[in-house]
C-alpha cells in the first residue's frame, strides 16, 4: 500500500439474537444471565435480564457461530445458534436443566484428606460459580469432605483452591466434569491436590516445554496434553522429551 492512497473500510452490519428461557416444566425464571461466545474468534457478550417473562435479546452481534450459555436460580443450560451478517436470529429457545448438589473428598497425592480447601463449580462461559454458602459446606472438613449446593449440571469445571494463597502448603487444581441433571446429588471421585514446592515469592523452575493449545470449541473432557515445543538445552530436552507435532519442513520423526 502506497503512502497517501485511499483505503475503503467496510463494516459488516451486525444483527440481533433473541429468544426465550424457561425452567423445565414451562415457568420462566425471574432473573437470568446470558453469555454468548464465538469460540472460533473469541468474541463474547454477556448480559443479565430481570422480570422479562423469560424473553431476552442481545443486539449488535457480528456474523458467527455462537454458544449461548444461560444461568439462573432454577438451573443452567447452553445451546448453539448461528448469526448471518446483517440478519437477526430469533426464536432461540433454551430450557434450563435443574441444578444439583456435588459431594466428594479432596486428598493429597498420597490419598490423605486435606482440610480447609474451597471447592467451586462453574459452568463454561459464565462468570459466576456455585460454592459459597452460610454453612461453608464447600470448604473441606477434617476428612476432606465437601458439598457444593446449587451447582450447574452438564459440562462444568470443578475448581479447588486453598483458603490462604500465600501461607497454605497446598496448591490448587481444576478439572472438567459432566454432571447429570437426572441425579439430584452426585458423588465425585477423590480430587488430588499437590503440595507447593516453591515458597511464595520464590521463582519456580522451568521445564522448557510448551503445550499445544486446544482448538476453539474443543471438548474439555476429551483434551489431551500434547507437547508442541521443547526448548533446546532445557531440562525437558535433557530428559529426552520431544515435540509430538510435525512442522511442515520436518522430514524425520518428532
Image: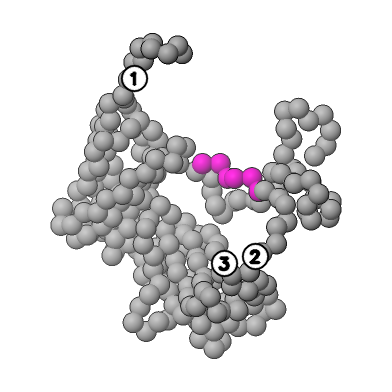
Foreground mark, 2 or 1, reads: 2
The reply to whether discs 3 and 2 touch (Cβ–Cβ < 8 Å) is no
Q: Nearer the viewer, residue 220 or 2?
A: 2
Label 2 element class: loop
In the image, residue 41 sits, relative to residue 23, either above or below, namely: above
Q: Nearer the viewer, residue 137 or 20?
A: 137
Disc 2 crowd rating (10 Å Cα; few below 14, some 14-19, many 20+) is few
At x 22%, y 59%, the residue is: 31
Q: Which residue is mark 1?
A: 9
- Provide the residue span drawn in magenta: 211-216
The reply to whether discs 2 and 1 touch (Cβ–Cβ < 8 Å) is no
Label 1 element class: loop
Q: Does residue 64 show up magenta in the picture?
A: no
Q: Which residue is mark 3?
A: 173
Q: Is residue 180 visible?
A: no
Label 3 element class: strand
In the image, residue 85 sits, relative to residue 106, either above or below, namely: above
Image x and y of residue 120, in percent: 45, 69
Q: Earlier in the sequence, mark 3 or mark 2?
A: 3
Foreground mark, 1 or 3, reads: 1
Q: Nearer the viewer, residue 24 or 241?
A: 241
Image x and y of residue 156, in percent: 46, 59
Q: Earlier in the sequence, mark 1 or mark 3?
A: 1
Q: Which residue is mark 2?
A: 203
Amino acid at each position: 500500500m502506497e503512502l497517501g492512497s485511499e483505503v475503503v473500510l467496510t463494516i459488516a452490519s451486525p444483527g440481533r439474537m433473541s429468544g426465550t428461557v424457561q425452567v423445565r416444566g414451562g415457568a420462566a425464571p425471574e432473573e437470568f444471565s446470558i453469555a454468548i461466545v464465538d469460540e472460533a474468534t473469541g468474541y463474547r457478550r454477556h448480559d443479565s435480564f430481570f422480570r422479562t417473562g423469560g424473553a431476552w435479546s442481545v443486539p449488535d452481534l457480528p456474523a458467527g457461530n455462537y454458544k449461548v450459555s444461560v444461568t439462573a436460580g432454577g438451573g443452567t443450560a447452553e445451546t448453539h445458534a448461528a448469526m448471518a451478517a446483517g440478519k437477526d436470529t430469533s426464536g432461540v429457545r433454551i430450557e434450563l436443566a435443574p441444578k444439583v448438589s456435588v459431594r466428594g473428598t479432596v486428598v493429597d497425592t498420597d490419598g490423605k484428606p486435606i482440610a480447609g480447601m474451597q471447592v467451586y463449580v462453574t459452568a463454561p462461559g459464565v462468570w459466576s460459580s456455585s460454592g459459597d454458602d452460610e454453612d461453608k459446606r464447600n470448604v473441606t472438613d477434617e476428612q476432606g469432605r465437601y458439598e457444593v449446593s446449587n451447582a450447574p449440571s452438564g459440562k462444568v469445571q470443578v475448581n479447588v483452591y486453598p483458603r490462604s494463597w500465600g501461607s497454605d502448603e497446598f496448591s490448587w487444581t481444576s478439572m472438567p466434569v459432566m454432571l447429570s441433571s437426572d441425579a439430584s446429588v452426585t458423588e465425585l471421585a477423590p480430587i488430588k491436590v499437590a503440595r507447593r514446592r516453591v515458597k511464595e515469592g520464590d521463582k519456580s523452575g522451568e521445564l522448557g516445554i510448551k503445550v499445544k493449545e486446544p482448538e476453539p470449541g474443543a471438548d474439555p473432557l476429551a483434551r489431551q496434553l500434547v507437547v508442541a515445543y521443547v526448548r533446546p538445552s532445557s531440562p525437558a530436552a535433557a530428559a529426552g522429551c520431544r515435540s509430538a507435532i510435525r512442522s511442515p519442513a520436518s522430514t524425520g520423526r518428532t
